[in-house]
């Protein structure tokens, strides 16, 4: 999307945030095998058509082993039963009055704890967007983005030249914390707008805001929801969203006051690459071995450690690391 140069998140734009009805959008590839064109199960609008997903009968829900993602759930007239084919994607159901927190008698809601931690963002040299309505990551998460989306192109994709670090202070809303979570679902942002997800149907972003306020969203790479869909070489990666309407000076847990930030420095990629001389990657007359071992866990861990070391060297006045709290988003609790 337009936000891609600054956005360490899903690789493709999404033009809409609400799933069209099944009657309005028939599958474009009726009964065709979609596994290879779609790269596996999940939302696949490029091949299948708008609002369509690549799914297999019996691979999600009570009749299967849930190897397909949630958008493959629901009852349908399947055009094929023995392979993955295009079907209408299923968005999470909107909260009903009977299930909404507003309709349930209750006592005072619990007060969420306050957390302070670092988050990171791969960026070019422009500062054209306000800090908010953006996607960010923990350190393994931003390194996977660089490994997977930016390198080893020359020039670097999107002109990315640095890693920025932010100290985030966060306090979730009582409505979300009452469900046992500090974080909501992680949405994608493109050009400063919430676009839901570029990979799965999450419905309109207001599904979260109208129930829990403008909370920070997160997703663990290991959970494969909403993205990435498969295991990565950075299994501890986490991606986040920071809704601008939740930013304030000092988080209180109000619906419009869930997080604040302060700048915690940056490092340049060329300085990072200079830590590992070699000929593995050359661009603009500079060569490095920093990016060697793309798929090797030990090399990925080395890169994460070297980023921490360079931040500590560049900004000795700040803590070397402020790890984030656990990403405690849970699909069932959140969408209930």
Image (cartoon, rainbow, N blue to C red):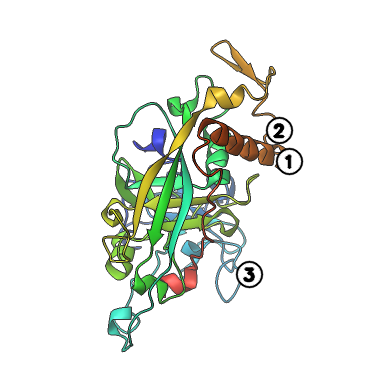
**Residue 159 occupies quadrant:** top left
Q: CB under 8 Å between callouts 2 and 1?
A: yes
Q: Which residue is mark 1?
A: 298
Residue positioned 68% across, 37% down in the render: 302
In the image, taking residue 72 as reference, residue 205 lies left or right, namely: left
Which image quadrant: the C terminus?
Answer: bottom left
Q: Earlier in the sequence, mark 2 or mark 1?
A: 2
Residue 47 horizontal/vertical position (percent)? 46, 45
Residue where numbered disc 3 is placed: 65
Counting residues from the start of the chain, the first of labels 3 and 1 encountered is 3
Please give the label number shown on residue 293.
Answer: 2
Which numbered disc, 3 or 1, marks the residue closer to the eye?
1
Spatial distance from mark 2 to mark 3, Cα to Cα?
34 Å
Q: Which of the marked residues, 2 or 3, is nearer the chain's N terminus?
A: 3
Q: Position of residue 48 (x, y in %)?
A: 45, 49
Look at the numbered discs 3 and 1 and tell me whether their residues touch, using CB distance below 8 Å.
no
Measured Cα–Cα span from mark 3 to mark 1 = 32 Å
Please tell me how crowded label 3 is: few (under 14), some (14-19), or many (20+) other residues with Cα within 10 Å. few
Q: Secondary structure at mark 1?
A: helix
Q: What is the x, y in percent for residue 190?
A: 34, 43
Can residue 27 be seen?
A: no
Above or below 213: residue 127:
above
Image height of 134 relative to 281, above or below: below
Q: Is residue 12 above or below residue 57?
A: above
Q: Nearer the viewer, residue 265 or 159?
A: 265
Q: Which circle marks residue 205 in the picture?
A: none
Distance of mark 2 from mark 1, alpha carbons?
8 Å
Q: Secondary structure at mark 2?
A: loop
Quarter that holds the N terminus: top left
């Amino acid at each position: 999307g337009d936000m891609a140069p600054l956005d360490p998140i899903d690789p493709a734009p999404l033009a809409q945030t609400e799933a069209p009805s099944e009657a309005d959008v028939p599958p474009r590839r009726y009964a065709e095998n979609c596994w290879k064109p779609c790269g596996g199960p999940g939302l696949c609008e490029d091949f299948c058509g708008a609002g369509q997903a690549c799914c297999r009968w019996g691979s999600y829900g009570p009749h299967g082993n849930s190897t397909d993602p949630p958008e493959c759930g629901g009852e349908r007239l399947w055009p094929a039963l023995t392979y993955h084919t295009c079907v209408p994607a299923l968005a999470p159901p909107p909260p009903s009055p009977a299930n909404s927190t507003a309709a349930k008698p209750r006592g005072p809601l619990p007060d969420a704890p306050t957390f302070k931690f670092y988050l990171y963002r791969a960026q070019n040299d422009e500062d054209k967007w306000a800090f908010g309505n953006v996607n960010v990551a923990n350190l393994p998460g931003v390194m996977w983005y660089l490994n997977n989306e930016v390198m080893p192109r020359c020039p670097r994709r999107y002109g990315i030249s640095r890693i920025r670090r932010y100290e985030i202070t966060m306090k979730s809303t009582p409505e979300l914390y009452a469900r046992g979570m500090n974080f909501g679902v992680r949405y994608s942002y493109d050009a400063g707008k919430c676009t839901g997800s570029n990979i799965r149907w999450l419905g309109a972003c207001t599904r979260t805001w109208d129930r829990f306020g403008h909370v920070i969203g997160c997703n663990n790479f290991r959970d494969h929801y909403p993205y990435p869909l498969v295991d990565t070489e950075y299994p501890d990666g986490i991606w986040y969203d920071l809704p601008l309407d939740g930013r304030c000076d000092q988080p209180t847990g109000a619906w419009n006051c869930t997080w604040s930030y302060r700048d915690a420095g940056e490092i340049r990629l060329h300085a990072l690459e200079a830590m590992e001389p070699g000929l593995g990657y050359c661009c603009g007359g500079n060569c490095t071995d920093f990016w060697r071992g793309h798929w090797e866990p030990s090399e990925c861990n080395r890169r994460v450690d070297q980023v921490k070391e360079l931040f500590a060297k560049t900004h000795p006045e700040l803590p070397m690391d402020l790890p984030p709290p656990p990403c405690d988003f849970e699909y069932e609790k959140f969408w209930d």
